[in-house]
Image (tube, helix red, strand yellow):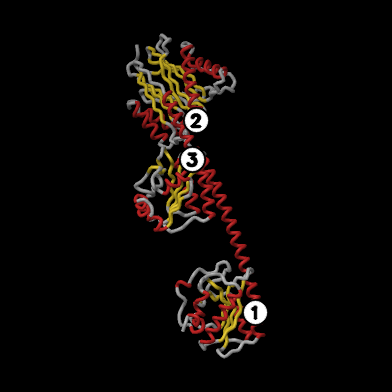
Amino acid sequence: MNDDNMLWTGSDLPSEEQERLLPAHIGLGAEPDEAMERFARLAARLLGVPAALVSVVEGHGQIVPGAVGLKEPWASSRRIPLPREANSGAPMDEETGRAVLARMCRSARESGTASCTGAPLTDQEGHVLGFLIAVGRASRVWNREERDALDDLAQVCSAELRLRILANQSREARLRARSALERSRTLLRTADDLAGAADPVQVRRSVRKLTTDDLDPVYVELLLREDGILRRVVDAADPQLVGAPYTEFRLDSAWPSALAVRTGTVVEVVGPAEIAEQSPEAREAFAQTGVRSLACIPLLGDTEAVGVLVLGWRTERRMDVVERALLRSLAEYTARAVQRAAFVNRRVQAARSMQQAMLTELPDVGGLDVEVLYRPAARDEMVGGDWYDAHALSRDPSGTVVFTVGDITGHDIHAAALMGQVRSMLRQASRDHPDGGPAQALTAFERANRALGVGASGTIVHVHLRAHRGGWLMTWSNAGHMPPLVVSPSRRVHRLEEHDLLIHPDLPDEPRTDHRMMLEAGSTLLMFTDGLVEHRGHSMDAAVGRVAQMLAAGVRRPLPALLGGIADEVAGDAHDDDIVMLAVRLADRRPG
């Protein structure tokens, strides 16, 4: 007994090789379908036979979504084989299908168990989708009228299958369109995220989110090109083992990612055979991570690849056309973000260097302990215009010492450059008007700021300290800045709230005001910028109050430790702006 007889005798089940994917384009499976069952019943009733079935070809075998009177185990499994000469899995035309059907029926008749007749079920292009088969007794003879009737019924059944194919194609097209729309929206969101990324770690996070949500790799790596080296972008918040322990390697090495950068093309490594062709170091990385598929997409810049995006899976898979298109777009966005981040980083470093170079060396003044704390913003790309100055008025015989803290508007290299100009201009104004007080110096600076078109704006508190027999006379003028704090040796805190308008070239030329206060020996003066006390979601007044409490509690604490403790507690590590704190403590012994 051969496999052709299995339809009728039920001696064996189809092999595992025959149990392939079902014809999803029709939407039928190896289970009863109401419409197909109805066609089987009609065929049985029309030809007066005990059994009939509707089968659908599925590669090397058939599924039976419609049946009446079918023997076991086929009635339960709903799967039957094709004859050996027809089970190649290749599509059949109608002529071939009729020949296969004749072979099936001849085998059934020769086995003495049944007699059958049938008709192919075809799609619009004439490919055989399956068969409509009527099964009678072994001695049954089929006349022309019966065969024509079954052919007519098969045409109706074929029409039903064609409609299902069209419906499924339409549904799949809608799903593809919806998927494409979602991917487009995701790419737009990622483009927005990448547009705001100011460093490679932020770029990696945005790219990782998109690829993880859409392509589901086990890891995502971003490697950047630096002087003949490919170096991983390491995110401390998301450690991975990709390529470990290799965090960098030469561009001329045999790593797939290096090849992608050198050639500017996508490099894929899929399956054990291709992995075995890699360098020992790369094979070690594959083994360590369990990766079986790798895709390296170069990040093409204006003149050369600036890096590579690496995706890995623990299954064997190659990217399809849609995935390649998605990753090409993503790589383009990523390359731009990397170049933009590098440009911003260069500007930030230049601004930081400029800012550091302009920080004043504190003067050594008898009877005064002077200390300053400067902390840049927690975000590297934030470069503020916060500054301070301290110097003695050499042309002033009274020994006046000048202290200034200011905040120039802006957070970029322009603000850092303006800060240097403002400091120099105000220092010159103070030296030109040593007897005029802080208000006159600020007024002279403002006039020069307008006349020379410098365009600086911001806040400044400008202080003169002069020794007196009763202590130190403090004279100050405040142009919209944070109020200085003064704490006496008895821990009483004075918050010097008096202030005028901030500095701005477009504001009216209003007179500046001097304020005076006699500081007793042992007092401490603290001037600071708003980066210390201004934080999203927190009260600035409460923060200033906490600074005052700590200042009062630390009247005997060394200034460096006091300033550091205040900054740590009040601003913390995640402050959004630069911090400048300048403290002046008067000696316990009164001068003169």
Q: Is residue 140 above or below residue 175?
A: below
Marks 3 and 2: in contact by CB < 8 Å?
no
Q: Is residue 515 visible?
A: no
Pick whichever of labels 1 and 3 is earlier in the sequence: 1
Distance, label 1 to label 3, CA atoms, is 65 Å
Residue annotated with mark 1: 151
Marks 3 and 1: in contact by CB < 8 Å?
no
Residue toward you, 357 or 136: 136
Q: Is residue 209 above or below residue 52?
A: above
Marks 1 and 2: in contact by CB < 8 Å?
no
Which tag is nearer the camera, tag 2 or tag 1? 1
SS at mark 3 in the image: loop
Q: Quadrant of residue 368?
A: top left
Pick whichever of labels 2 and 3 is earlier in the sequence: 3
Residue annotated with mark 2: 412
Side of 368 where 207 appears, left or right: right
x then y, percent, for residue 414: 51, 27
Residue annotated with mark 3: 304
